[in-house]
Image: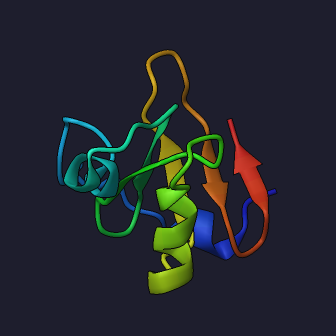
Amino acid sequence: MFCEHLREAKDPMPRTIKGCEECLASGSHWVALRLCRVCGHVGCCDSSPGKHATRHFQETHHAVMRSIEKGESWTWCYVDEKMVA
């Protein structure tokens, strides 16, 4: 069942298409990319050293992100810990 955050999520344009914003700035690397469905921030997944998508949630409280990896179409709510495929 949908949580309120997932129901209200938008689909903003990514702020960059080059990769994780923080990893690009620091010269680090990422495993997979996630898009914040509130502001369009692009961050790396929790398998990446920086875990920037989760860090973005912790700093901004933007609850919903989705995978922007080719072939993946799932969305995750950090607050309610719910996924929609």
Relative to 15, 62 lies left or right: right
Relative vertical location of residue 51 with respect to residue 60 in this rendering, above or below: above
Q: Position of residue 1 (x, y in %)?
A: 82, 56
Determine the residue positioned at 48% across, 84% down: 59
| Side of 25 where 61 appears, left or right | right
Picture colour scheme: rainbow
Give coordinates of residue 11: x percent, y percent: 34, 53
Foreground of the two, 29 or 62:
29
Q: Residue at position x 31%, y 58% from top?
A: 22
Q: Could you tell me residue 12's position as x and y percent?
A: 27, 56
Horizontal side, residue 26 vs residue 61: left or right: left
Direction top: furthest residue: 71
Quarter residue 78 falls in: bottom right
Q: Position of residue 10 (x, y in %)?
A: 38, 61
From the viewer's perspective, tell me whether residue 17 is left or right of residue 66: left
Q: Residue furthest front?
A: 27
Q: Could you tell me which residue is drawn at 66 percent across and 63 percent down?
A: 77
Q: How many marks?
A: 0
Is the C terminus in the top left, top right, bottom left or bottom right quadrant?
A: top right
Tell me what residue is drawn at x 46 percent, y 26 percent.
69
Q: Nearer the viewer, residue 10 or 35?
A: 35
